[in-house]
Image (tube, rainbow, N blue to C red):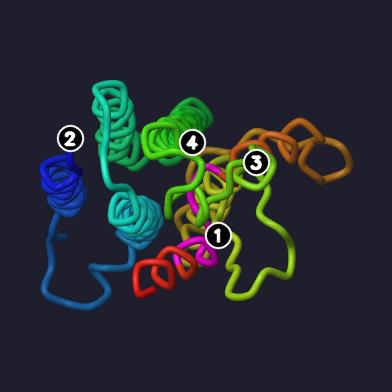
Amino acid sequence: MGTGRLEAFSDGVIAIIITIMVLELKAPHGGGFDALIPTIPIFLSYVLSFVYVGIYWNNHHHMLHAAEQVSGAGLWANLHLLFWLSLIPFVTAWMDENSFTAAPVATYGFVLLMASIAYFILARILIRDNGPASKLAQAIGTDQHEVLAPRRGARGHVPVPAPALLAVADEHVAQGAADLVGHRPAQAPPCGHGGHWPRWASQTARDAGGAAASSSGRARIRSLQRS
């Protein structure tokens, strides 16, 4: 079957996800700009989640435009991806309500990790459905290493933040903003290793970083579509 209905359904779900996230931003009590200061950490977490969902929508859009058909397994893989993306508003709100303590931030990172794995599964199924000679396979690359770790220095390549790095950045940016306005959330768990994140965190970031397609892949898809 074609990908038109799948793309339309996914666009609608992602639009609802973004709408739910912005509705979680509560208007402050007060008519001055100083009333916005306590909401800065919450706003930063919203921006981070918005950017992450936007990356998925952009890459998902280009991937489906390059695909010509999708199987039943591809439909379920797409639902699997949308399931994890639909949890982003929940874990974002949980972090906001609990001042970015360890458990909500860890859950946030886990959801982002699972979304990246779900995207990778969807991409592999679509490549299988459309064949190794399809535009999609040529754009993404049939080699698993190419998908997980795009070549350094590729033209137009912009590294996509990995889920683990996003979770760490979200916590530390929010804490820094809170310190700036004089309201420090609960203490974040120490990273250890002399102030550096342990090797397993870096490995997790490397393993999950390629699940969303790089911008070089999107450029290759567009060039193949024009040809």
Nearer to us of marks 4 and 2 is 2
Residue type for callout 2: Met
Amino acid type at mark 3: Asp
Pointer 2: what residue? 1
Q: Nearer the viewer, residue 64 or 2?
A: 2
Q: Quadrant location of the N terminus?
A: top left
Q: Which is more N-terminal, label 3 or label 2?
A: 2
- Decide if residue 71 is on the left or right side of residue 112: left
Q: Position of residue 115 (x, y in %)?
A: 42, 34
Task: Classify residue 160 by image quadrant.
Answer: bottom right
Is 105 covered by the magenta stretch? no
Q: Earlier in the sequence, mark 4 or mark 2?
A: 2
Q: Amino acid at mark 1?
A: Gly
Sequence-wise, the earlier of marks 1 and 3 is: 3
**Dot label at residue 143:** 3
Quarter of the image for residue 152 reads: bottom right
Q: Earlier in the sequence, mark 2 or mark 1?
A: 2
Quick one: label 2, few (<14), some, or many (20+) residues within 10 Å? few
Residue drawn at x 17%, y 50% is: 11
Tell me the CA gap for discs 2 and 1. Answer: 49 Å
Is residue 45 among the parts visible in the rendering? no
Sequence-wise, which precedes: disc 1 or disc 4? 4
Per the image, label 1 sits on a secondary structure element best described as: helix
Magenta stretch: includes residue 214: yes
The residue at 44%/38% (across/down) is 131
- Find disc 1 in the rendering and name its residue: 176
Residues under numbered marks 4 and 2 in contact, where contact means CB atoms less than 8 Å apart: no
Q: Is residue 72 above or below residue 88?
A: above
Highlighted magenta segment, given as a residue range: 211-218
